[in-house]
Image (cartoon, grey):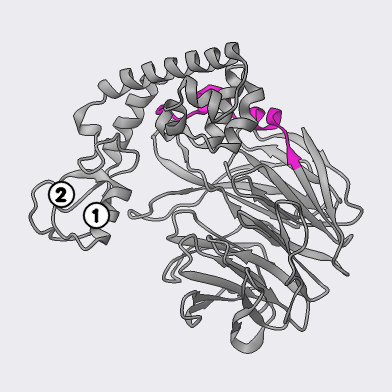
Amino acid sequence: MVKLIHTLADHGDDVNYCAFSSSLLATCSLDKTIRLYSLSDFTELPHSPLKFHTYAVHCCCFSPSGHILASCSTDGTTVLWNTQNGQTLAVLEQPRGSPVRVCRFSPDSTCLVSGAADGTVVLWNAQSYKLHRCGSVKDGSLVACAFSPSRNLFVTGSSCGDLTVWDDKMKCLHSEKAHDLGITCCDFSSQPVSDGEQSLQFFRLATCGQDCQIKIWVVPLSHILGFELKYKSTLSGHCAPILACAFSHNGQLLVSGSVDKSVIVYDINTENILHTLTQHTRYVTTCAFAPNILLLATGSMDKTVNIWQFDLEMLCQARSTEDQLKPFTEDWSEDDVSTWLCTQELKDLVGVFKMNNIDGKELLNLTKESLADDLKIESLGLRSKVLRKIEELRTQVKTLSSEIPDEFICPITRELMQDPVIASDGYSYEKEAMENWISKKKRTSPMTNLVLPSVVLIPNRTLKMAIDRWLETHKK
């Protein structure tokens, strides 16, 4: 299910953190350096290691594009690096020079947060490299931070155990004691989940701490009517303080690393333990999943970073097969297509489809010629089986599309709305489409062509609930 495929042993001291971009792995250490590796063969880049910090490097993170790497240190600085040549772009000095324990880029790359041992949290402008806003927590050091995928808030965790939620203007929305002996790490899942009862959507948040617990929280996508953080559950498995936790890119797996020297992989939907990895010989300090592919990196005080690969059974086991696939095939990601192939007993084709970046739209456009010429599927019988399954999907798509009520269709995209909002013209639109419309300086209504009195968009929860109920009755 999980296979150790590589071990990196270049650091001269404890590995404190590791992070992935789409093509690189970064690691940092008590030895004051940051190292960069290519994901293609795990060789170290020519300009690695990166050297600037004068004390231990505690954390590193990539910008969403992967072009910039941030690192922070006991020396009181957060340094921004050009990942392509290793050049220093900026040195951000924490107020009062306090040791910086954690740093994070916002999902839109506009901001960078740094948290320090004196409890200060700084929001930096990631374009001008200037201090934008600054705040602080009451007690303890700031040791953990994570941005919500919706970009409008982030959370911090302190060594005193306080979990604090901030909006993008550094206003404190919520604070509570989450772990009695101190928080060590936190992470948001990038994939929203639905509340079955009210059809509302949430992001999962995982926190872990010195109390040997992982706690799962749910955070609403929108907090226009007030913010609410809800505790959901506690995951067990470790017998010692937990130092790191991270969600997989598809949101289906959660991994944790502990003082007990083990790494545990959970199915986040069932909260069952899928695997326990015990190859590290000292405390596991960090863990991270790669984006888009099921690779896991774990770092330890044994000075090594282990790279793990997940097989297809793990992928399929962590998804509740077809029931969790999006009702509309056009919306399927490459991972959704892989899951569908597994459910159709076509698991052997997953690698070929992945290599050719086949998502839902590409899947529906496949022909017998493209299967033979582009995907190189030689077996006539196998091609025929794939085409038969795809034709079934096309029939379902046509049936589903023809039945969509007009009020569920976005006037801009002419597609079923997933996140409907009400504009000031009184009409409902898909949120992203309307935001794009307004961002192009179109202050007029897409429906009436009149000037919009306001650009404020209000979530249409009633319509969202109706769409979700309709989808439930039309699932395959």
| Mark 2 lies on residue | 446
Mark 1 Cα within 10 Å, few/some/many (few <14, many 20+)? some
Residue tagged 1: 437
Q: Nearer the viewer, residue 37 or 209?
A: 37
**Residue type, numbered disc 2:** Pro
Question: Taking 391 as reference, is 173 above or below it?
Answer: below
Residue 48, above or below 317: below
Please identify the quarter of the rendering in which residue 391 is found. Answer: top left
Q: Residue at x 64, y 28 (%)?
A: 316
35 or 109, nearer to the observer: 35
Residues drawn in magenta: 309-328
Nearer to the camera, 297 or 347: 347
Whole-percent x, y for residue 81 in the image: 62, 74
Q: CA distance from mark 2 to mark 1?
A: 8 Å
Q: Amino acid at mark 1?
A: Trp
Viewport quadrant of the N terminus = top right
Is residue 313 in the magenta section?
yes
